[in-house]
Amino acid sequence: MKAIVLLSGGLDSILAARLIKGQGIEIEAVNFLTVFCNCTSRGKTCLASTAAAASLGISLKVFEVTEEYISIVKAPKHGYGRGLNPCLDCRIFIFKKAGEYMRQSGASFIVTGEVLGERPMSQRRDAMRIIEEESGLKGFIVRPLCAKLMEPSIPEKDGLVDREKLLNIQGRCRKPQIQLAREFDIHNYPCPAGGCLLTDKGFAARMRDLMKHSPDFSVRDVKFLKIGRHFRLGSGAKLIVGRDEGENAKLSALAEEEDFCIRPVGIPGSTGIGRGFFNDDQLNLAARILARYSDIPSGRYLEVEYRKMTEENESRIMAMAVKEEDLAALRI
């Protein structure tokens, strides 16, 4: 008998896996990765889930699902949380994917570290019911940490899982999980703050701006949101400014052929990437913003060069740093 565990790498999912594995059931971990995860290594794997799977001695399969997931972010059936996080739709999507893999791999059920009442949007009793029904997994999800507070799952009813060895944890207090981690000798687990950028207020604001001005945005557009300072210079013009040399390099690597590369001449400073259509006024404004983030003394003009990424020859503008109050009005 085999089960598929949804392994985020957080303490709850680690404990859930440990409880089921402790019953002699074979488990395999899965993790679903998107561009909105902030616990990745170069966007290729989830560091937390990889470490957790290794500590549990189980295999891990990671699925990159950004392209499919973007449609959910754009128009979630069940709405958003406090940020731009479509938690209910996200869980339904993930469970559907896990269910597909469960059937392909010959597993019998899904294991998750959910705790009743721990998360306000997706871990309410009614939300859990909706997730089960809309994912097509009604009765096939085992929640070891709160199982005794829920209706028995099919694996519990059939005796595949010993319900008496499952728990009745609920609410947002972490003390029961921390105590259980001590008993299992589990250490160095990540904090429970979550790994979704869509819950971050600043990132959510950038996403809303992107969705408003570029509704057909790409994965590359989202990757830009994770780097630098962002400014809206017009409906079709956006400037992204690197904070340091590392971000300057990342922005230049992400830039596309029609993007503008904007840099100070002769002195250290930030690189700016202009995306969209820029008229002369907006190019001048972009140069003034670059002057603000350069080492030019206050009140002096800075020479700024700009060119499209496909062009070899650049044009130049003399610009004085934009005023702070004007900059604040442009910042996303």
Image (tube, rainbow, N blue to C red):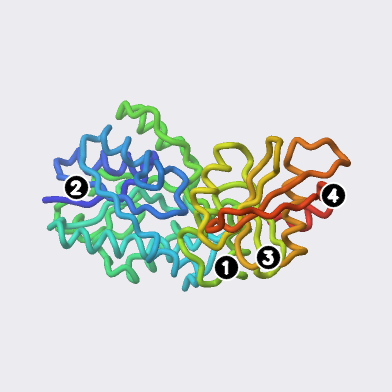
| Percent of width and height locating residue 101 | 21, 59
**Which residue matches tag 2?**
162
Residue in the image at 61% along x and 52% along y: 261
Q: CA distance from mark 2 to mark 4?
A: 67 Å
Q: SS for tag 1?
A: helix
CA separation, marks 4 and 3? 20 Å
Q: Furthest residue to the right?
A: 299
Any part of residue 82 in sight = no
Q: Secondary structure at mark 2?
A: loop
Q: Secondary structure at mark 3?
A: loop
Q: Horizontally, is 98 left or right of 217 in the view?
A: left
Mark 4 or mark 3, earlier in chain:
3
Q: Mark 3 or mark 1, which has the lower sequence index?
A: 1
**Are circles 2 and 3 on residues that touch, CB within 8 Å?**
no
Q: Which residue is mark 3?
A: 278
| In front: label 2 or label 3 | 3
Q: CA distance from mark 1 to mark 2?
A: 47 Å
Foreground disc of the pair 3, 1? 3
- Which residue sits at x=70%, y=37%? 266
Q: Nearer the viewer, residue 47 or 218?
A: 218
Front of the two marks 1 and 2: 1
Residue for badge 1: 211
Labels 4, 3: front one? 3
Residue 323, disc: 4
Q: How would you rate the neighbour count of disc 3 (Cα within 10 Å): few for under 14, some for 14-19, many for 20 or more?
A: many
x, y percent for residue 172: 50, 45
Marks 4 and 1, the one that precedes in the sequence = 1
Q: CA distance from mark 2 to mark 3?
A: 64 Å
The residue furthest front is: 313
- Total marks in image: 4
Closer to us: 117 or 14: 14
Question: In the image, what residue occupies the spot 84% across and 49% down?
Answer: 323
